[in-house]
Image: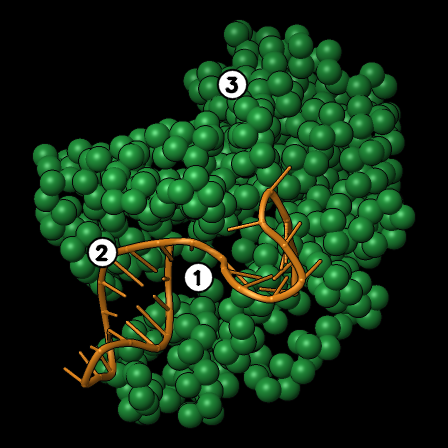
Amino acid sequence: MQNSDVARFFEELADLLEVDGANPFRIRAYRKAVRTIGSLPDSIADIINDEDRKLTDLPGIGKDLAAKIAGIVETGRLHQLDEINEKFPPGVRDMLRMSGVGPKKVAVLFNDLSVTSLDELKQAAENGRVAALKGFGEKTEQSILEQIDRVAEAGNRFHIDIAMREADAILDDLLQLESVVQAKVAGSCRRRKETVGDLDLLATSIAPAEAMDRLAEHESVDKVLARGETKQRVRLRSGIEMDLRVVADESYGAAMQYFTGSKEHNIVIRRRAQERGLKVNEYGVFRGEELIAGQTEEDVYAAVDLPWIPPELREDRGEIPLAEQDQLPTLVELQDIRGDLHMHTTATDGRNSIEEMVEAAKARGLKYIAITDHSKRVTMANGLDAERLREHWRAIDEVRGRISDIDVMCGIECDILEDGRMDLDDEVLSEADWVVAVLHYGLKQPREQIQKRLLNAIRCPYVTAIGHPSGRIVLKRPGADVGYKDVFKAAADFGVMMEINAHPSRLDLDDVHAAAARDQNIPIVISTDAHSTAGFDVMRYGVNQARRAGLEKKDVANTRTFKQFCKMLRTA
DNA sequence: GCCGTTTTCGGCCCGACTGTTTTCAGTCG
């Protein structure tokens, strides 16, 4: 059982308790537990089995929750959840995913209309039975009908790259207005989470209505959902919902801090303010009626005796104590990256030749790269056997002779087979400059087998890094059940690096495990896995993930010069 | 549910906006 599985029990329970009208603070406690478990680098099961550790030492886990967690790990069940599932069928939770429909409304839909699924809700709405309910009306019914197909199909979260592209296009447009002084993205997008549920834009202007009009007319806006004096909510054609807040310049910092979140981070900030006899809201920091800070974020943090905290860290995962002690990391930046150690060419499933990839890498300012096409197991991608690989390396060597100012390594993305063997023999692997070992198949194997495969790869003397360790696809497929603790220990012992795959669909290592790897002094490489020259552009998402993990330049191996980087490679 | 140099009970962040309302509950971030 993975931590995310345990977390899911409490997430489901919290959702259903909310529909049931339970004590909101109890629900909050369950949600906090979901976050705590989700941001835990070690397996919950390991902690339970560890003599020296107690679940109750974890923040937000008391006696009751510790017992429930232990029960889940042991039996695979949570009886409170079984109980409440008797009351509410599984479709009830799906209804909560629609915006404008919260737990109270879901309860009415279920109790008064006996609607138990999105399908049934759709029928009820089409027949006008929803609008007739007390507390509902025409508009609510219409809103449900507009959302229901999309929510049923795709859920309501989006990859960070899509969100950032949408936000940037609209921000550029808003900044065209004379009256708009500043416009930036806030919310989870600014925190660079791997997925976002919606977009928050913040602008300062003396003419809010003008900014809102401009947004409403933007080509990517499908519909205005709500509009007030300072706030407008729209739905984009892509399905993403977006809030625009327009504030006065003197409140910009406070509003930015407020709307960047996370909610959990802000709760701690506001509690600190309370302790100091202050109140923080989106308009500023107040002592009584008096505004004492708010123009910049730095001012807001200073008011509660903290240095400015980078948005990527604002998750209440330990950043506040660090800030208090002035120990915040200096996060790695995109400009720090000098090399890219994972990419493909036309030899397998890439779209560009060796030469095109090398030139494109050079044009982006990279000083060294490793070309890592697939090994033979990946037949779909025309993976290379030993003979073709050697031929490919000769071709790389030939390009290397012609192009200067960039070092090119002869690499391979070598599959770790289902039985734990490497897809290519030691003999050919020993000739490589760089070997990224990866899992592509058998990701659903039990933990022990996944473990065996990864440890075998790490023990293979020619493997230099483990690529996209879990094999997850964001929003689509969960990763393998990786026992990170043992994997990291082995990687540290054998001098194998761990990859953060920068592709927005992978971002694997995730932030939590990247931080755990760093804590074991394992060098991290951030690589694009480019399948075309345009593929290099995703590097920034990998860097974002590293920043969320709190990684500094020194923690990331491919910020080094080529010479320094080579010195970090294990010697077989 | 958790938590405690204001501790074992009584707290637990704060405001905007909508829709369905005759004064505000629900939802959202």
Q: Which mark is residue A156?
A: 1
Query: Is A295 situated left or right of A30 in this image?
Result: left
Q: Which residue is mark 3?
A: A336
Query: Which chain is home to disc 1?
Result: A
Helix, strand or loop at label 2? It is: strand
Between A150 and A260, the one lying in front of the other is A260
Q: Which mark is residue A232?
A: 2
**Residue A201, image x and y in percent?**
29, 45
Query: Which chain is home to disc 2?
Result: A
Q: Is residue A384 visible?
A: no
Tell me which numbered mark, 2 or 1, is placed earlier along the sequence: 1
Q: Is residue A123 above or below residue A535?
A: below
Estimate the spatial distance between the alpha carbons at disc 1 and disc 3, rounded to whole Å: 34 Å
> What amino acid type should be assigned to the residue bearing mark 3?
Asp
> What amino acid type should be assigned to the residue bearing mark 1?
Asn
**Residue A180, image x and y in percent?**
15, 37
Q: Which mark is residue A263?
A: none
Q: Are marks 1 and 3 on the same chain?
A: yes
Quadrant in which the N terminus of chain A appears: bottom right
Helix, strand or loop at label 3? It is: helix
Helix, strand or loop at label 1? It is: loop
User: Which residue corresponds to the image point at 30% horizontal and 34% vertical from the top-left?
Assistant: A293
Q: Is residue A83 above or below residue A287?
A: below
Query: Is A63 situated left or right of A355 in this image?
Result: right
Q: Which chain is green?
A: A
> What amino acid type should be assigned to the residue bearing mark 2?
Gln
Q: Is residue A404 visible?
A: yes
Colour of chain B in the image: orange
Q: Is residue A209 above or below residue A352?
A: below
User: Which residue corresponds to the image point at 87% horizontal and 48% vertical from the top-left?
Assistant: A50
Between A164 and A275, the one lying in front of the other is A275
